[in-house]
Image: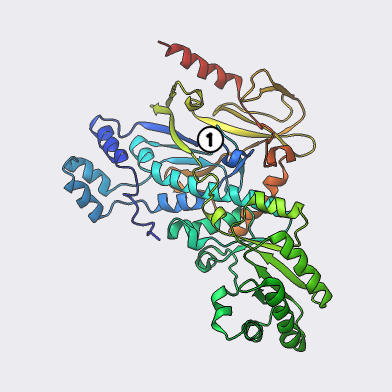
Amino acid sequence: MLDNTALALLCDFYEITMGRGYFKAGLRDRIAYFDVFYRKNPDGGGYAIAAGLEQIADYIKNLRFGADDIEYLRSKKIFDEDFLTYLQTFRFTGDIWAVPEGTVIFPGEPIITVRAPVIEAQLIETYVLLQINHQTLVATKASRIVRAADGRPVSEFGSRRAHGESAAVLGARAAYIGGCAGTACAISDKMFGVPAGGTMAHSWVQMFDDEYEAFATYCRLYPDSPTLLVDTYNVLTSGIPNAIRAVKEILWPMGKTKCAIRLDSGDITYLTRKARKMLDEAGLTDCRITVSNSLDEHIIDEILRQGAQVDAFGVGERLITASSMPVFGAVYKLAATEENGEITPKIKISENTAKITNPHFKKVYRLYGEEGKAEADYICLHDETLTDNEPLELFDPDYTWKRKTMTKYTARELLKPIFLGGECVYEFPPLSEVRENCRREIESMWGEVLRFENPHNYYVDLSQKLWDLKHEMLRSRRG
């Protein structure tokens, strides 16, 4: 993995050319507000899970231009020495607000807001987006898969199919936030405390003269709840009978009964039903059945509907790469500038209405109804305050004729201060607490929002002041 103390040049080159442009134009001290948001939920779903913030904070705290970075930029022969001198002493001095990791998020709302001198705000754009886009995508996919498993533990198995080493390590982290029970990636356990586990591959079975000896040897070496891979040859006539024999002849005399078999191929529904019957008839009622092999939320949901007898899942390539929709699509857009304490809203206009931005410095509230479920998110200007039970009329974001009137609710502000004056003021919780926060967040959502197909359109509305400002800016720029 790249050293996060040497990532100043992990940016798009235009961020540096614009930085030099701002510097030469006398704008280096102009304060800019940038919002990070996304436009569409992955996989046609109803929500996403925020992840990646801790890595962003580590990057910003360590952001420095080293001597070799400066020399590289000097070699391009387009940067003045005064600008290079500025970069030599570069430090982030701005403010950042963000939703905590594990928070359920929705399209169009700010999930990170950066307020900083414009060069500083511009130079962090790429790294902020790459972490949000990657980890949020994997955390969201993990959440969907874990929900499909319906209480059965899911382990992340995808390191060897990940798009590079950082994707493997941080992908395991994001999958854990999304609800996975653990990972096969040992370094993610070392670095982040994501529980790592694993037993054997097919090569272990093939190395021995016969399958039984492979299983028996493994049981002798790891008698505490071993998992035996039973599909190297023939699951029903060889793998399961030999696993049963090894358990009875090796584990039972030791007083051990906990064990598992794993299936990595074949008709999972058929084989697990047969396996469960064979194991139970042999007295191995404590033996669990784990399955893997190119699984995702749709396959898991379907095989369980068909009666598959599965106790745990291992999910690899379709989780770590989020293969069904491998791009999250978060963007980093200017929302306002500030000079002498005066904030000037900015808007981006496009013929594609989905790309029109919401201007100004904003905050986001989540509204919870009387049953404790999230009913809507409310985006307003930074100086607006929403109090509990204040009457609100909300509009559906896609169908403006649909209205939702709320009079009994509690309001929670989502964006938390992360950096103030260049100092990190947020205490990042242990990853296990982030994962638990994600679980609570999912529980606070109605099932209609969480379903895989045709999810309910969650309300994300603008305050009247923000709506009026946006449309006044649009009108003023017509023609």
Residue 461 point in image, percent of width and height: 62, 26
Residue 354 point in image, percent of width and height: 51, 26
Q: Residue at x 56, y 59 (%)?
A: 316
Question: How is the structure coloured here?
Answer: rainbow
Residue 209 versus residue 294 in the image, above or below: below
* Viewer-closest of 351 and 96: 351
Amino acid type, label 1 = Pro
Is label 1 in a helix, a strand or a loop? loop
Q: Which residue is mark 1?
A: 110
Residue 148 versus residue 155 in the image, above or below: above
Q: Residue at x 38, y 59 (%)?
A: 2
Q: Quadrant of residue 273?
A: bottom right
Quarter of the image containing the N terminus?
bottom left
* Viewer-closest of 285 and 177: 285
Residue 362 point in image, percent of width and height: 53, 30
Quarter of the image containing the C terminus?
top left
Residue 199 versus residue 96 in the image, above or below: below
Residue 394 point in image, percent of width and height: 67, 23
Determine if residue 430 is in view: no
Determine if residue 348 is in view: yes
Q: Residue at x 61, y 83 (%)?
A: 214
Residue 230 versus residue 336 in the image, above or below: below
